[in-house]
Image (tube, helix red, strand yellow):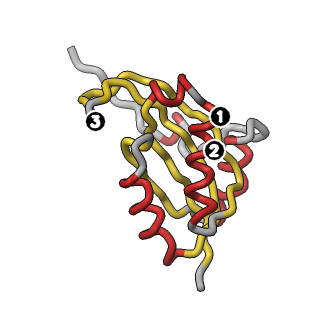
Amino acid sequence: MAVNTYEGMFLLDSNKYAANHEGTIAEILGLLERVGATVLAQRPWQDTKLTYPIKGQRKGLYFLTYFTLETQQLTELSRLCKLNETILRSMMLKLDPALIQPMVNMALGQGDIVTLFHDSDMPMLALSK
């Protein structure tokens, strides 16, 4: 069975996170553990006002995780996320093997900013008046 590394972004109810952040983190990590994932890194990313209400919430906290998981378990993880009242939305992306270590290091606060795009790569556009 194929085991891949994924980036998981969970949009959480920020009120529930503010009331019990340790319990909320444990809930997310428990879901990942339940489907057999091995968490490589995790951290809160951004608490923000939402553009439109999601499940009646106007604010949300983005929670970033990196984990390894058997591909077949992604469906079960998505199902569990939809049933969870704290998780407003979720998204999992398969990481390219070359990006795994830099991304995990960044999430752990140990990495350098890695970019493949440089301003010098962009052609200069003439501004017309």
Local SS, label 3: strand
- Mark carried by residue 54: 3
C-alpha distance separating marks 3 and 2: 22 Å
Q: Residue furthest bottom?
A: 1
Pointers 3 and 2 in contact (CB under 8 A)?
no
Q: Amino acid at mark 2?
A: Ala
Q: Nearer the viewer, residue 128 or 47?
A: 47
Q: Quadrant of the C terminus?
A: top left
- Mark carried by residue 22: 1
C-alpha distance separating marks 1 and 3: 23 Å
Q: Residue at x 43, y 24 (%)?
A: 48
Residue indicated by mark 2: 26
- 3 versus 41 height, above or below: below
Left or right: where does residue 65 sit relative to residue 79? Answer: right
Residue 51, x across and y down, in percent: 28, 27
Pointers 2 and 1 in contact (CB under 8 A)?
yes
Q: Amino acid at mark 1?
A: Glu
Q: Quadrant of the N terminus?
A: bottom right
Local SS, label 1: helix
Residue 80, x across and y down, in percent: 44, 59
Q: Nearer the viewer, residue 82 or 50?
A: 82
Local SS, label 2: helix
Residue 16, x across and y down, in percent: 48, 29
Q: Amino acid at mark 3?
A: Ile
Left or right: where does residue 47 sit relative to residue 3? Answer: left
Left or right: where does residue 116 sit relative to residue 80? Answer: right
Question: Mark 3 or mark 2, which is nearer to you?
Answer: 2
Q: How many other residues sit within 10 Å of disc 2, few (<14), some (14-19) or many (≥20)?
A: few
Residue 37, x across and y down, in percent: 63, 64
